[in-house]
Amino acid sequence: MANENVSVIFKVYCLTVMTLVAATYTVALRYTRTISTEELYFSTTAVCIAEVIKLVLSLGMLTKETGSLVRLKATIQEHIFCSPKELLKLSVPSVVYAVQNNMAFIALSNLDAAVYQVTYQLKIPCTALCTVFMLNRSLSRLQWFSVFMLCGGVSLVQWKPAEATKVQIEQNPVIGFIAIAVAVLCSGFAGVYFEKVLKSSETSLWVRNIQMYLSGIVITLIGVYMTDGERVMEKGFFFGYTPWVCFVVFLASVGGLYTSVVVKYTDNIMKGFSAAAAIVLSMVASVILFGLQITMTFALGAFFVIISIYLYGLPKQDTSRLIRKDTNLEDKQKLISV
């Protein structure tokens, strides 16, 4: 009984942390991109620093997993320095995730946090399609229904987007939506690709993360040079960094790692509740911080999205037993009629 109580408490803890990280990251990032335009930090450098922190944290977790520095050295030697093919394989999601993370900054520079949080749930149908085609899995009728409901909900949100009255900077909702669309496609493909790589071998999750983040650091540095190279050389790599910006980078680093760990201990229903709660929290925070004016179409669309997330996470019904019962009943009826 004690074990069950601990397990329930731990699941509630995981759900709470996942929700707070998702909502806080979105709102905090939006805040850092709209408070000032004169000393605005370079988003490409923030993405790069987040990759470095993820690498350090993954090395720490791998050290704990191996149990000694000798085993750690042997593991790194085997899977990093002696496995160039594996590094190349993990460079694919590294590129895609780098694009996704940069698109999040562009989207939240042009859209409110609540609008972003709702629209970003399009990653669910995108991930579902990638799962069907890349992992040869099937979706239930209820899941397909929830996918179409989610798309309809997002369409309502975008039909007449809610406006933030306290944001004074110029925004382009079209650019924001395009950025979300690219981020959604990247999220779906990279997530399923990484899952396929993880399940194709028994290599440790932390080893795979290290392989991916090494490539990610190189790719994001190239992105810094190509996008903001001249300005970074002129003003410095950490130009515009404030405690809030550091907090955003921290959430971006810890959030991804934490989610990959807690997925083992939670089910789809709990993850659905987490996403729904994050939407609600983002809406409340946007109303308070940014003066978001929620329209009827936005509220209705957000409601449809929340319901669809819950329906998509419901476990598939095992119809094999029902079919057997039906066949048995038919056989009995035939015997009675004879």
Image: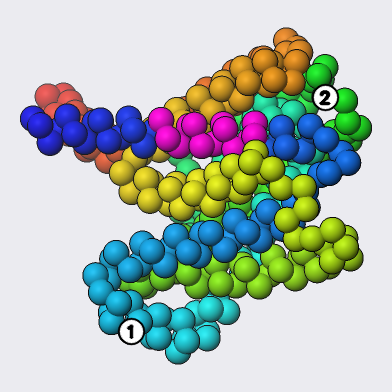
State the mark number for residue 74. 1
Measured along the vertical axis of the image, is residue 168 above or below residue 82?
A: above
| Sequence-first tag of 2 and 1 | 1
- Residue 304 appears in view: no
Asked whether residue 25 is drawn in magenta, I would say yes
Query: SS for tag 1?
Result: helix
Compare residues 149 and 276 and report the one nearer the observer.
276
Q: Residue furthest bottom?
A: 82
Q: Report x, y in % for residue 276.
A: 52, 26
Q: Report x, y in % for residue 11.
A: 30, 35
Q: Amino acid at mark 1?
A: Ala
Please tell me which residue is depicted at 61% across the width and 25% down the height of the picture: 282
- Residue 167 appears in view: yes
Query: SS for tag 2?
Result: loop
Give the side of residue 201 with respect to residue 94, left or right.
left
Mark 2, Cα crowd under 10 Å, few <14 / some 14-19 / many 20+, is some
Please tell me which residue is depicted at 57% across the width and 63% down the height of the picture: 52
What range is drawn magenta here? Answer: 16-28
Q: Amino acid at mark 2?
A: Val
State the mark number for residue 58. none
- Magenta stretch, overall SS: helix
Please tell me which residue is depicted at 27% across the width and 41% down the height of the picture: 320
Mark 1, Cα crowd under 10 Å, few <14 / some 14-19 / many 20+, is few
Give the side of residue 79 with respect to residue 7, left or right.
right
Residue indicated by mark 2: 167
Q: The C terminus lies in which quarter of the figure? A: top left
Please tell me which residue is depicted at 65% across the width and 38% down the height of the picture: 244
- The alpha-carbon separation of the residues under discs 2 and 1 comes to 53 Å
Compare residues 242 and 35 and report the one nearer the observer.
242
Q: The N terminus lies in which quarter of the figure? A: top left
Measured along the vertical axis of the image, is residue 322 above or below residue 223?
A: above
